[in-house]
Amino acid sequence: MSWHKIYGLSLRHVYLIKGSFPRILDLIYWPSIQVFLWGFISEFFTMSSSYYSNTVGIILTAAILYDFLFRSSISYNMMFLEEIWSRNFTNLFIAPIKISEIIAALTMTAIFRTLIGLVPAVLLAIPLFGVSIFKLGIPLIFLLIALYIFGISLGLLVTAGLLRFGPSFENIAWASLFFLAPLGCIYYPIEILPGVLQVIAKILPLVHIFEEMRNILINQTVNILEIFKGVLISFVYFGLGVIVFYTAYYGAKIKGTLINIGE
């Protein structure tokens, strides 16, 4: 694996973002809107519910963490789609670049796009609603790592679909996280789900991540085992995503459909 090639691929997308104000605005706009929307909704819940003693803090922290996951996945997908839209897709695979280098470059650059949107949203939440995700303490680092790896895993699965089915699979890139959100128990505890769905939900890292987030904020305790489960399951999905991506790539290469994707 050549770090020079990975750096070059990453730099291309960094320059695309730096040179386009609409791209930067789009990255900042949606996370900030999420903060306003869920901040006001959770303040309303505070007036009507006694379930949480800190409704605003818990729901808004969940919204910020979920948006971090969403942006991680979408950022990965968007950089792949940029190659298709700019008709550079074929060049990418003709060049002497390994698949592992492409995956590494997109994985590294996705965090740059994600942080552009996350940082303003986090900073807005502090003065507007008195909510800071930093109250989670050191566990926040591991929760973000688990969310980021899972987001990249979903990105790999979606890009594998793009390789296999072409640009017609693009809509799945936008909808993938919405399919999983109800099972992720982002804004509510897992007990809300029916028994069968609880079993399915537990094989996702999201349940362990967001349950632990609520545990830290409500009970002021840290369950290291839950954090470990979230991180471990995320890496398992990442490994699965890499395998599926490679399978889709070689399948498209054998069928001869790879060269037509960017056209």
Image (tube, rainbow, N blue to C red):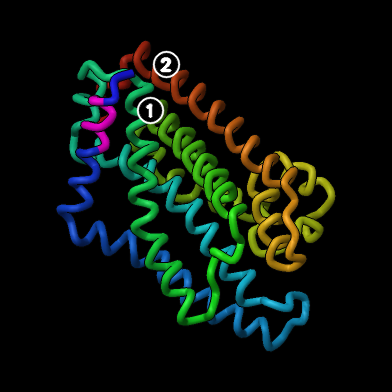
Q: Which residue position is annotated with label 1? A: 163
- Quarter of the image where one finds residue 261: top left
Q: How many marks?
A: 2
Q: Residue furthest bottom?
A: 47
Observer-nearest residue: 189 or 121? Answer: 121
Residue drawn at the location 48% of the way across and 75% of the way down? 126
Residue drawn at the location 55% of the way across and 65% of the way down? 133
Mark 1 touching mark 2, by CB under 8 A?
Answer: yes
Q: Relative to 39, say whether 207 is above or below.
A: above
Instruction: Tell me the magenta residue range.
Output: 4-10
Where is the C terminus found, in terms of image quarters? top left
Q: Is residue 6 magenta?
A: yes
Where is the N terminus found, in terms of image quarters? top left
Residue drawn at the location 78% of the way across and 48% of the way down? 198
Q: Which residue position is annotated with label 2? A: 251
Give the amino acid type for the residue marked by disc 1 in the picture.
Answer: Leu
Task: Left or right? Give the position of 82 relative to 63.
Answer: left
- Quarter of the image where one finds residue 100: top left
